[in-house]
């Protein structure tokens, strides 16, 4: 297991979630549901709770909602990370609140396997649309 700053105080499930978050490559994302599915344990809400409580020590911006919306209250910080890492984004329509872009989930989603597709951006879990029910 990786070493988190407070790893001796973390619950075992939280440690596992944070380990997965640390594995996500720059420029890629996994949904809360993807991480739960990858672990074979818990669900999107449990992963979200871990990220809310302990996620500050890992690349939290790479663990996202399935609809590609940026984390409320942290949009600008996340957007800076996404632009720095060249994470695929979809520009917001002009009538959208604040004109904040969304993640391009089809291109940004990571399946947890090193390498992915030939372009390095495989669709990941549910990229065909079937897994987008995760939040």
Image (cartoon, rainbow, N blue to C red):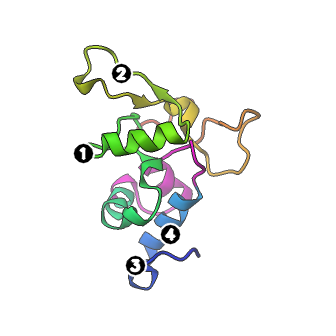
Magenta residue check for 36: yes
Chain-order first, disc 3 or disc 4:
3
Q: Is mark 4 on a helix, strand or loop?
A: helix
Circle 2 or circle 4, nearest the eye: 2
Toward the right, the furthest residue is: 118
- Residue 78 seen by the camera: yes
Which residue position is annotated with label 4? 16
Q: Earlier in the sequence, mark 2 or mark 4?
A: 4
Give the residue drawn at x 33%, y 16%.
93
Residue furthest out toward the top: 94
How far apart are the alpha carbons under marks 3 and 4? 10 Å
Which residue has dot 2 on it? Answer: 92
Q: Where is residue 94 in the image (x, y as percent from the top left)?
A: 30, 14
Query: Where, by quadrant of the figure, is residue 122 drawn?
Result: top right
At horizontal 24% and vertical 26% (from top left) the residue drawn is 98
Percent from the top left, x then y, of residue 81? 46, 44
Dividing the image into 4 quarters, which one contains the N terminus? bottom right
Q: Which of marks 1 and 2 is nearer the N terminus?
A: 1
- Dots 3 and 2: beta carbons under 8 Å? no
Question: Which residue is denoted by mark 1 in the rendering?
Answer: 73
Q: Nearer the viewer, mark 3 or mark 1?
A: 1
Residue 62 in the image: x percent, y percent?
Answer: 47, 49
Badge 1 local density, few (<14 within 10 Å), some, or many (20+)? few
Q: How far apart are marks 1 and 2 (CA)?
A: 17 Å
Q: Is mark 2 on a helix, strand or loop?
A: loop
The number of numbered discs placed on residues in the rendered structure image is 4
- 64 over 67 or under it: above or below: below
Residue 83's spot in the image, x, y percent? Answer: 48, 36
**Distance (Cα) linking label 3 and label 1:** 25 Å
């Amino acid at each position: 297991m990786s070493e988190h700053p407070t790893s001796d105080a973390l619950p075992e499930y939280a440690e596992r979630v944070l380990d997965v978050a640390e594995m996500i490559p720059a420029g890629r994302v996994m949904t809360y549901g993807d991480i739960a599915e990858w672990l074979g344990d818990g669900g999107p809400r449990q992963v979200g709770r871990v990220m809310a409580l302990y996620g500050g020590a890992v690349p939290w911006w790479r663990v996202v909602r399935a609809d590609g919306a940026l984390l409320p209250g942290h949009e600008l910080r996340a957007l800076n990370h996404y632009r720095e890492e060249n994470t695929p984004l979809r520009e917001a329509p002009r009538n959208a609140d604040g004109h904040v872009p969304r993640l391009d989930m089809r291109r940004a989603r990571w399946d947890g396997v090193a390498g992915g597709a030939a372009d390095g951006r495989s669709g990941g879990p549910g990229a065909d649309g079937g897994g987008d029910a995760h939040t």
